Amino acid sequence: MRTHSFLTVLLWSSVLYVVHMMPSQKRTNKHSHSERITGLSENDGKTLHRTKRGWMWNQFFLLEEYTGPDTQYVGKLHTDQDKGDGNLKYILTGDGAGSLFIIDENTGDIHAAKKLDREEKSLYVLRAKAIDRKTGRQVEPESEFIIKIHDINDNEPKFTKDMYTASIPEMSGVGTSVIQVTATDADDANYGNSAKVVYSILQGQPYFSVDPETGIIKTALPDMSRENREQYQVVIQAKDMGGQMGGLSGTTTVNITLTDVNDNPPRFPQSSYQFSSPESAPPGTPLGRIKANDPDVGENAEIEYSISNGDGSDMFDIITDKDTQEGIITVKKHLDFENKVLYTLKVEASNTHPDPRFLQLGPFKDTAFVKISVEDTDEPPVFSRPWYLIEVDEDAKEGSIIGQVVAQDPDIAKNAIKYSLDRHTDLDRIFNIYSGNGSLFLSKPLDREETPWHNITVIATEINNPKQSSQIPVFIRILDINDHAPEFANYYETFVCENAKAGQLIQTVSAIDKDQPPRGHKFFFELVPEFAVHPNFSVVDNKDNTAGIMTRRNGYSRSKTSTYLLPIIIFDNDYPIQSSTGTLTIRVCACDSRGNMQSCSAEALLLPAGLSTGALVAILLCIIILLILVVLFTALKRQRKKEPLIISKDDVRDNIVTYNDEGGGEEDTQAFDIGTLRNPEAREESKMRRDVIPEAIFQIRRTAPLWENIDVQDFIHRRLKENDSDPAAPPYDSLATYAYEGNDSVANSLSSLESLTTEGNQDYDYLSDWGPRFKKLADMYGGEDSDRD
């Protein structure tokens, strides 16, 4: 018999009591003993023994939140194989082994290395084994045990929300549930009362109460009115330890709103109202507003206004303004001061959504009286009808009366009325009206086919007050007379085959008429009498406003006659009878055996088709030739165009030079180049003409030098003579003007033409002796300072 050792763990708790190992339900009791089982084997007949295991512990307890100075002792691992010689080594594995729980491998003592929190982890599963240090083999099978953390009351109850919001209808009965609040406690609900929560109300009494166990908030007072108070704030406390002293607690706030119910009827603030309206107010005109007060809100305060009684219920109306809940009194029909001046209405205001629960409080409606006085106004004239319809024959004569409109002043004064036409509705001035009696007459003849209807507007105006006027539409229908003859309905392109037989239908024609007889159109067709003798064709009236064109002989020849003209007379049956003659053009064509046209004469083909292709090409060529001629003419005209006579100031030919001032002497060189005038050789260089484009280069004729001639007048005359006798001069007249003062001046010549071209000092003191007229010149040139300036 072999005896197996077992592993024992001893646990000392922090409250100094021994927690014995709980035996497993599948294991034996405390003491280890051997139970001998005897039996024979099939082979050798050896006796077998079964050894039962002793202590099988599986659960230990440890308090959370340990705050002692040393590590918390959990228990001790020990086996009977441990002789105390240090040959065995204890090993701990599982949840928290090595970090939360440490073991002395020599002694087997287990300690909690850290403070434990049951709310983080309440159960740890560990495994223990003992091994031989020398052989490294286990001396006992590995055993598993559990460490449970005992709870302490270290967590206060916490509500699921920091703030709750709830609502309940006003006028609710006592005990009506409002909302349920819930608080949870993280402590262990299975261990003591640490997690047993009790609810109480700290604020909100006596209006509300709370169930201590469920946390349901209920009403505590009856008939709480929203109109008196709408908002309530309730503070609820949740306390653990069953609400006993020393328990931890938490609070939350519940905002409760009383919602509105329709428990208040509308009420008018006054019993009667007074309004006034001018009699000219059109229907729909608002006269005033009334309002009934309802302390309810939302749809419970919606009011419907109506007129329940009164002598003005058919003349006035009341509508509800949905935004302001006011009743608007409006005009329903036209008022007449001369007929009635005062109306009384009974107006009713009622809720549109009454609550049946509160109908016993009384009728949810109220009434008030409204008095409306009608004010007299100067009204415009009123016509006897809303519109007029006048029918007139198309052949009515100018000046004939076609109808009459009537209007009168509705006021008591009965002012006189004058009539006129709105010419914007009768731009052609076909109609006119007598201003005194409103009779309409014609000013121009009518044409129904052009305008069958005329819509004009007649204006009636008070003579004493022209601002008072009214208008009325007048519809004039023009009645038709038979004044148009019927004519062909279409342009017919008719042909006859050369091989046609007598009696063959070649065309069916119809007619139209612009007139509209009341019994409908009826047309008759026949040939012109002179064509009825030996005709080539005949006309057969089909009695349905159409006629058939029939052949009268066999065969037609294009070479003899390519086109036939057939005049047909068309009659109508209205009075007076109208007729017209329409000519039908019939072409002779070559056809196949089935009567299908193959070809016709060129003249006949071109007649309905318009211009031929050759004619269009000829017209196009003419247009192109005209365009070419226009382009050539424009180009020649541009070549003939000459440049301007004077291009720049550098042209030194004889030009018009005009200067009308006395000049500043030799220093005045702004008007012209005096040196060039005195020395004509300076400009007699070979220069090309710049007024026209030169066709050939020619030599400029040189003249005898005249620079030694000091007589300017003689110089001018010589120049004029040379230009007049010059054969190379341009073929246009030139005018050369030179200002010459002459020999009669008291001061002689002031021009600088006779002065030397070289600069030098001159004495201008003699200018002071010429009198006041030359004082300005004397001041300018009389002194040396002036020269220096």
Image (cartoon, grey):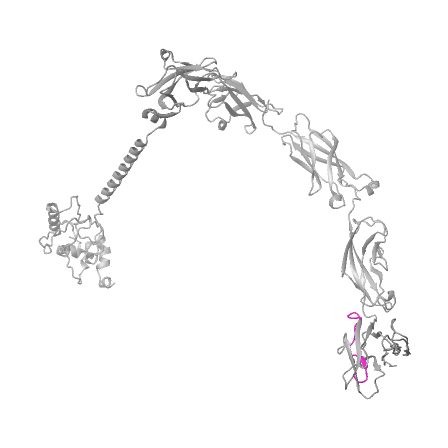
Majority secondary structure of magenta residues:
loop
Q: Is residue 655 left or right of residue 142?
A: left
Is residue 272 highlighted in magenta? Answer: no
Q: Nearer the viewer, residue 580 or 755?
A: 580
Q: Nearer the viewer, residue 393 or 417?
A: 393
Q: Is residue 153 above or below residue 659?
A: below
Residue 4's quadrant in the figure? bottom right
Rendered location of residue 668, percent (x, y): 21, 56
| Residue placed furthest toward the front | 43
Question: What's the residue at 22%, 59% (across, down)?
Answer: 781
Rendered location of residue 281, percent (x, y): 63, 32
Rendered location of residue 735, percent (x, y): 17, 45
Q: Is residue 587 left or right of residue 428?
A: left
Which portion, as a residue range, is magenta?
105-122
Q: Nearer the viewer, residue 395 or 471?
A: 395
Q: Is residue 696 left or right of residue 328?
A: left
Q: Is residue 383 above or below residue 286?
A: above
Rendered location of residue 520, percent (x, y): 51, 17
Residue 706's quadrant in the figure? bottom left
Tell me the quarter of the image containing the C terminus.
bottom left
